[in-house]
Image (cartoon, rainbow, N blue to C red):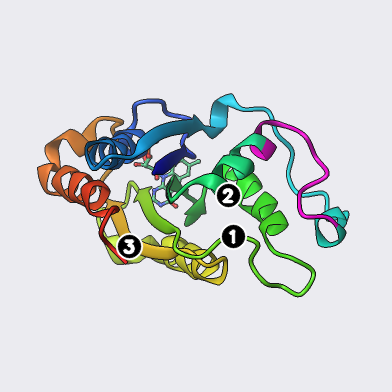
Amino acid sequence: MKAIGIVGSPRKNGNVDKLVQTVLDGARDAGFQITKYYLNEMEYSGCQACGFCKSHDHCQLDDDVSKLLRDMAEADAVIFGSPIYFCLFTGQFKLMEDRMYSLIDAGFNTRLRPGKKAIIVTSQGNPEMEAVEKAATDFAGILKFLGFSVTEIIRMTNGGAPDAVLERTDLLDKARSAGLALERSG
Ligand SMILES: Cc1cc2nc3c(=O)[nH]c(=O)nc-3n(C[C@H](O)[C@H](O)[C@H](O)COP(=O)(O)O)c2cc1C
């Protein structure tokens, strides 16, 4: 079993990174082989809308996200993490998300095999969770369209300081449990 984590924050070891890592630690303890991607350290372009992926089963671009997408296709579980920037996921994350268009065929059916699990991790400065809930909820809809079963959404609030999540043992516990549960959650 394979689980990959994707960190869409430029802050390495920030709140999203720590929560994604905690989910991955749980997954590793449940028997998964784990890998983590830092989007901010990768070189990649946004979708070029060339349509190549509708006549072929992959994206025409060959860059760091191409490798990530191949890994995503193989993985049993994917942990998608991004902070909230201006009420949305980061630009780094959105460029990757648009490239996931290549996971859909010309008939708008997913190319991913069934049974994949996904967990979404977000962090925001705003203390009110409801203020920017939409980004994760909308992304969960995209993941369901792609055939993922979204087993958990973990939302950090008041995350201005990069290590604020260390005070949120409830969220760290939730992240670890979500990782451990990946094996059995359906
Ligand atoms: C460019 C930028 C835009 C942001 N926009 C928002 C926002 O719209 N709402 C919010 O609650 N926090 C916003 N924040 C705060 C981050 O979401 C918050 O610090 C988050 O916890 C960062 O996660 P990280 O520690 O994983 O990097 C913004 C931060 C930056 C740098």
> Would you say 16 lies left or right of 165 here?
right
Mark 2 and mark 3: span between their CA atoms?
Answer: 18 Å
Point out the frontmost of discs 1 and 3.
1
Q: Which residue is drawn at 39% across and 54% down?
A: 120
> Would you say 91 lies left or right of 59 here?
left
Q: Which residue is tagged 1?
A: 112
Q: Where is residue 18 in the image (x, y as percent from the top left)?
A: 29, 34
Which residues lie in the magenta part?
56-66
- Judging from the image, what secondary structure is the residue with disc 1 in? loop
Residue 1 to residue 183: above or below? above
Q: Where is residue 36 in the image (x, y as percent from the top left)?
A: 44, 32
User: What amino acid type is highlighted by mark number 3?
Assistant: Thr
Q: How many numbered circles does the render carry?
A: 3
Which is nearer the N-term, disc 1 or disc 3?
A: 1
Do labels 1 and 2 touch, CB within 8 Å? Answer: yes
Q: Which residue is tagged 3?
A: 151
| Image quadrant where one finds the C terminus | bottom left
Q: Which residue is tagged 2?
A: 73
Ligand 1 within 8 Å of the CB at mark 2:
no
Work out which residue is located at the far bottom of the displayed protein and give it: 107
Q: Does the magenta stretch include residue 65?
A: yes
Nearer the observer, 102 or 115:
115
User: What amino acid type is highlighted by mark number 1?
Assistant: Leu
Which is nearer the N-term, disc 1 or disc 2?
A: 2
